[in-house]
Image (cartoon, grey):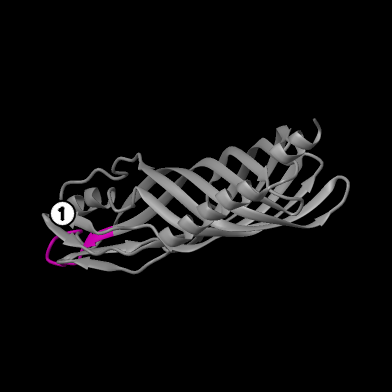
Amino acid sequence: MTKLITLLTLILLISVGINNGYSQNSFGLEFGHNWTAISGRSYDFDSISVVPDIGADAGEGFGGIFYEYEVSKGFSLHNKLNYGQRFVSYDVYNKDKVCQFCPVPKNELVAIASFAFEILPQFTIIESSNLKLNLFAGVNTTFNLIHTDLITKIPDQKGVTSVMNSLQNVVNPVTLSFAYGASIEIWRVILWSKVNPISPFAKSVKINDKEYDFDNSWGFVSFSIGYKFYSLKRKSKRQETGSL
């Protein structure tokens, strides 16, 4: 993933350097909705079982800004910065049947504030006077901030509460994934359809001074709408020199 990000950065620098025509910088707002899919497996930490709530759900809305640098007539670099919320749910219980009510699962909901930054090289495959159809693919870097308390306040039932507290730290502060999709631009209104394939988000978790591997993944399908509210055209130095 690090090599891919380096490659995209080089493409950006080379593209900007070789551009000899007009370039257009566009800015705008974007609002949309993510549909979420969680994958993973159950984990046992001694007598404690943790079962992630896997599968798809309706997800959450998001909003942000975008910046687009038009390198050439059919190629641009589309960059997004969006904010939204994500939720990961777990059932935690003690398998010891001697303990009264221990096998009853207790739910832990991890709420995450996410700031997602995407670098998306984009190709225009159809263009008319007020219509563009674009295809894009690139890298998503998301900064995850946990902001949650225990959903269920309970006495510690042979380690259940300590495991639930540890799960609040299971999400990596920074996650990387791919992103690809298509957009339709009608005048200044843009409609996006985008996929972030399944990618890992969990790290090892520390429970009672022991480190345990923990592997969960998430993926997203999103639809959004945006509006270009400002653009600036710039001449290359070669054209400026030729016009003197």
Q: Is residue 199 above or below residue 17?
A: below
Could you say whether the residue bearing mark 1 is in a helix, strand or loop?
A: loop
Q: Image quadrant for the N terminus?
A: bottom left
Query: In this figure, which residue is indicated by the disc labeled 1?
Result: 157
Q: Nearer the viewer, residue 222 or 46?
A: 222
Magenta residues (range): 92-101
- Report the side of 192 relative to 218 (left or right): right
Where does the image place residue 233, in percent across and percent down from the top left? 74, 35
Q: Residues within 10 Å of mark 1 (few under 14, many from 20)?
A: some
Answer with the quarter of the image where residue 208 lies.
Answer: bottom left
Residue 5 in the figure: left or right of residue 148: right
Q: Considering the image in quadrants, where does the C terminus appear?
A: top right
Q: Main secondary structure of the magenta part?
A: loop
165, above or below 239, in the image: below
Could you say where residue 143 lies in the image, as x and y percent from the top left?
41, 45
Residue at 15 percent of width and 49 percent of height: 156
Whether residue 1 is visible, yes or no, is no
Is residue 125 visible in the rendered image? The answer is: yes
Q: Position of residue 201 (x, y in %)?
A: 38, 57
Residue 234 placement, left or right of 109: right
Residue 242 picture location, percent across and down: 79, 37
Residue 62 within the segment the image draws in magenta = no
- The three-letter amino acid code for the residue at tag 1 is Gln
Residue at 83% across, 49% down:
131
Total marks shown come to 1
Q: Residue at x 30, y 40 (%)?
A: 149
Residue in the picture at 62% in, 54% down: 121
